[in-house]
Each structure stands twice: as structure tokens, then as C-alpha cells.
Amino acid sequence: MHDLYRKARCHGRGGFTLVELMIAIGVIAILAAIAVPGVVSWLPNYRLKSAARDMISNFQKAKMEAVKRNTDVIIAFTAANATQTGSYRIFVDNNPGNGAFDAGERVLVDHKPMPKDVSLYFANFLGATNTGFNSRALPWNNRLGSVRFRNSRLTRFYRASLSAAGHVRLQISSDGINWN
């Protein structure tokens, strides 16, 4: 009988009171109110950095494919306009020298769009919007230049530049003019 009384007493003590539960919910609400503005302001810069690094990876992919296939691989950019945030396509150029996407050519990356709050606003490779690599991993037709990205708040910019040796360098700027 003594055990039955003890079990009943312990059973009644489990759980939280309504006051304890309301205090816990209040603390969580305060922490969320503090954290959300920070995350919201951080997200466009995170997406921008991710898009720029993705572009660098795709430059490397294009270079490796050009060497592997012993042909030209082209990266064709479409800069942002009033309705689109910009994109790019990477393809194997079966008609070496023309640099244009023709029917039947293998697409490696098809119209890669920019993430939310990011725009590809500039692409210039010796006056053209396309570049790529030849079978020796050098810039196609010596098309050197850069592609630039920015976030929607215009607080951070990235630039991917292609050198004569086929190296791609990523730089950052806070104003789109002075690059680190």
C-alpha cells in the first residue's frame, strides 16, 4: 500500500505548469525577435557569395571539360535586365571558333539562373559576353575579362576575372568600383 501511495505522489509531479510553459514561450519569442533581423540582412550576402563561388566552380568545370574532350567549351552570359537577374550557359562547342550555341551541341550547364536577391549585372570578355576554354585550358580566343555579381541591397559585389593563363580570380567590393 505504501508503494501505491508513493507512485501516485510521484505521478502527480511530472510535467510543466502553465506559468513555466508561458515563460519558456516568452523567452523563445524574445530570442527569435532578436535573431530574425540579423538573418534577414545576412541572407542576401550569403546568396551572393554562393553564386560567385558557384561561378568559379563552373569555370573550373568548363576548363576540365575542354581538356578532357580536346575541344572548346564556351561559357555564354546573359546580363541582368529589367525583368531577369542574369544567367549563363556552358556548352561544348562542336563548331570550334564560332562560340555560339548550335543545335546538337552538348550543354553542361543550361541557363543557370541567379539566386534570389542576386544579379549577374556585367559580363565583358574583350567586348563580348562569352568566353571559355580551349583544349589546352587557356581562354578561348584570348577572351579575357570578368563577370560581376551584386546583391539586391547593393552592399556587396563580387567579380570573377579570367587571366591569360586561364586562372579565375574572385574579388569582393563594397561599392562595385574598388576591388580587393
Image (cartoon, grey):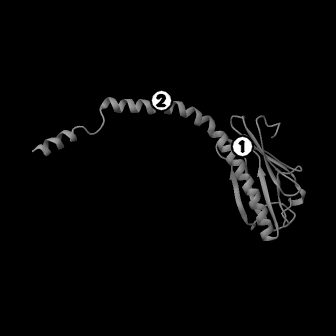
- Is residue 59 among what the camera can see? yes
Q: Earlier in the sequence, mark 1 or mark 2?
A: 2
In-image side of 155 versus 178 (left or right): left
Total numbered labels? 2
Q: Quadrant of the C terminus?
A: top right
Task: Decide if residue 2 is on the left or right side of residue 71.
Answer: left
The residue drawn where x is 78% and y is 70% is 69
Q: Residue furthest left?
A: 1
Give the CA distance from mark 1 to mark 2.
34 Å
Seen from the viewer's position, the closer of residues 57 and 119 is 57
| Viewer can see residue 102 | no
Q: Which residue appears at 82% of the width and 68% of the height?
A: 71
- Image position, residue 114 (x, y; %): 68, 47
- Element under disc 1: strand
Q: Position of residue 68 (x, y in %)?
A: 78, 70
Instruction: Look at the numbered disc 2 and give the secondary structure of its residue.
Output: helix
Amino acid tagged 2:
Ile
Q: Which disc is residue 119 wearing?
A: 1
Expressed as whole percent of the image width and height from the top left, the position of residue 26 reads 42, 29
Q: Check residue 40 in the rendering and tell me which mark sits there, or answer none.
A: none
The answer to the question of whether label 1 and label 2 lie on touching residues, with beta carbons closer than 8 A, is no
Give me the residue at 69% from left, 48% from top. 51
Residue 86 in picture, x, y percent from top left: 73, 47
Please give the name of the residue rendered at 21% of the width and 38% of the height, measured from the top-left corner.
12
Task: Give the residue at mark 2.
Answer: 30
